[in-house]
Amino acid sequence: MVQPRVARPTDCRSIAGAGAEVSAPDAERPAGGAADVDARPVHVAVIMDGNRRWARERGLADIDGHVAGVDAVRRLVRHVVDAGIPVLSLYAFSRENWARSDDEVAGLFRLLAAAIRSETPELVAQGVRVRVLGRLAELPQDLRAQVEEALEATAAGDRLQLNIAFNYGGRTELVDAVRRIVVSGVPAAEIDEGTIAAALYTAGLPDPDLVIRTGGEQRLSNFLIWQSAYAEFCSCPMSWPDFGPEAFDAALEEYASRTRRFGR
């Protein structure tokens, strides 16, 4: 007896893992390295956790941990450029972080401004293009102006798309996306996953293949919650300031050992 075909919803095919167009700098992927080139992720996202714990374990002020964290970012960006991975997203400041003390928040803003001034020339030289994910309008005007200058200065980067999630929240991103869709007037019946993806802060970029979290925690903490639906997750026990190229390559090795099925 022939079994009847299963009736499926017309929109049942998710865009996850469908090979979204990479609107990011085209990088030459070197042969060899930490993992087989074909098994390397296109987009790696990192939740940089553990700066304060790192500082407190050493009897230092919290801001010293964040300063060390900036040094870790510098090392990782150089390594990722050399590895030929096209897209890197870093979770730098969440909207929940506003709940921290005034001193710490102000210190983080000063640190970002200083990093922009010191790092932009090197990012330009390395061919890194920067995008900020989050509500820039809520940041102090002087900081916002410096961020916008850095974005313009790096716009021609063609080796790495570096996304900095600052004043970012995954649920806030979805709220903003819904607002954009409503304002655009798209009929409800025509809204699908592609419509929503095109309204996100990450519009035009591929979803993360791999999400790494340092500090030993095993949760997304409201980071790229739509985009990471089918990402592989890797938790690293070391705090962010201690995370370097070797730990990153170990995460790539772990990623390469997994089989991604996307529900199939």
Image (tube, grey):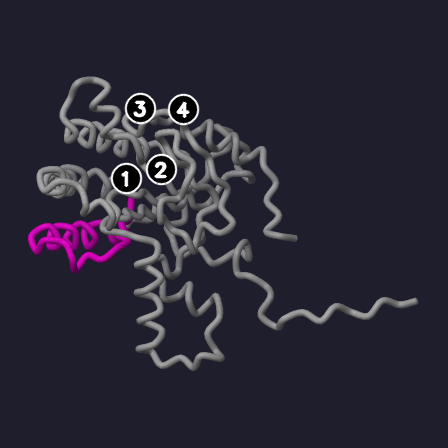
Which callout, 3 or 1, points to the residue nearer the camera? 3
Q: CA distance from mark 4 to mark 2?
A: 15 Å
Which callout, 4 or 2, points to the residue nearer the camera? 4
Which callout, 1 or 4, points to the residue nearer the camera? 4
Q: CA distance from mark 1 to mark 4?
A: 21 Å
Q: Determine if the magenta segment contains residue 147.
A: yes
The quarter holding residue 71 reads top left
Mark closer to the chain start, 1 or 2 = 2
First to last magenta residue range: 127-156
Residue 121 coordinates in the image, percent (x, y): 17, 41
Callout 1 amino acid: Gln
Q: Which residue is labeled 2 in the image?
A: 81
Dot 4 falls on a residue whose secondary structure is helix
Residue 48 coordinates in the image, percent (x, y): 31, 36
Q: Which residue is labeled 4 in the image?
A: 246
Callout 4 amino acid: Glu
Residue 213 coordinates in the image, percent (x, y): 39, 36
Callout 3 amino acid: Asp
Q: Which residue is labeled 1 in the image?
A: 126
Residue 34, relative to residue 196: is it above or below? above
The quarter holding residue 100 reads top left
Residue 136, relative to residue 1: is it above or below? above
Mark closer to the chain start, 1 or 4 = 1
Q: Are marks 1 and 2 in contact (CB under 8 Å)?
A: yes
Q: CA distance from mark 4 to mark 3?
A: 10 Å
